[in-house]
Amino acid sequence: MKKLYIIIWILMLLLLFILVLSSCTRTVTLYFTSMEGSEFYLVPETRQIDSSVNMFEQAVRELVKGPYDKGIYPTLPHDVTVNSVKIMNRLAIVDFDISIISNFEDIPHSSTMETLALYSITNTLTEFEEVDRVKITIEGKESGQVDGFFVEDFWGHVGIYEEFVRNEEIIKDE
């Protein structure tokens, strides 16, 4: 009988351990680029992230890692560092290092790709109920120059002059 109680206690502890671990993760939706003919759009991809740390920052870092699904493409250069993501009054302020605007090899800097990149970030973060708008900064700046690059021009077409809101029109469910 004593062995039965021990086994029951071990099973209960194991169940509790599994519940605690599963409650530390959260499913997030990330947005990456897809193409159909000559049309480009964003498609969702879900991931599990650790919800015990800054999950907003983790979501953006997952964007940098790129998609897992075949047939969809990254929206951000692979070497970008996410310096921080802070939430204030439903505004996510995302700060990147300079490589987001200085790396031309990974992602072509066209107006289409710039729009996709900006809304990939924005649509990913607005999946969280705590976020309505997104502001992007580079090395802590929203204007001026960093290493000879004009921050507010981003990739030179759309720019990061203002806050971004979710754009459903650019998303295509596959």
Image: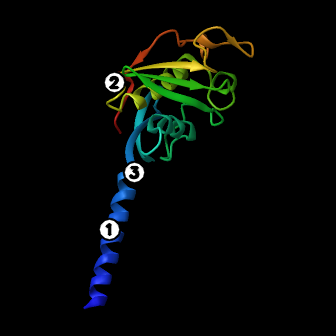
Between discs 1 and 2, the one toward the N terminus? 1
> Disc 2 vs disc 3: which is toward the camera?
3
Mark number for residue 15? 1
The answer to whether 114 appears left or right of 131 in the picture is: right
Q: Which residue is at the front of the view, 34 or 159?
A: 159
Whole-percent x, y for residue 76 in the image: 57, 31
Residue at the disc numbered 2:
168
Q: Which residue is at the front of the view, 118 or 95?
A: 95
> Disc 1 vs disc 2: which is toward the camera?
1
Which residue lies most toward the bottom here? 1
Between discs 2 and 3, the one toward the N terminus? 3
Q: Are marks 1 and 2 in contact (CB under 8 Å)?
A: no
Mark number for residue 24? 3
Whole-percent x, y for residue 158 in the image: 53, 12
Whole-percent x, y for residue 39 in the image: 45, 26
Whole-percent x, y for residue 38 in the image: 48, 26
Q: Secondary structure at mark 2?
A: helix
Q: Residues within 10 Å of mark 1 (few under 14, many from 20)?
A: few
Cα separation, mark 1 vs mark 2, equals 40 Å
Which residue is pictured at 36% across the width and 70% down the height?
14
Which residue is pictured at 61% across the width and 20% down the height?
138
Cα separation, mark 2 vs mark 3, equals 29 Å
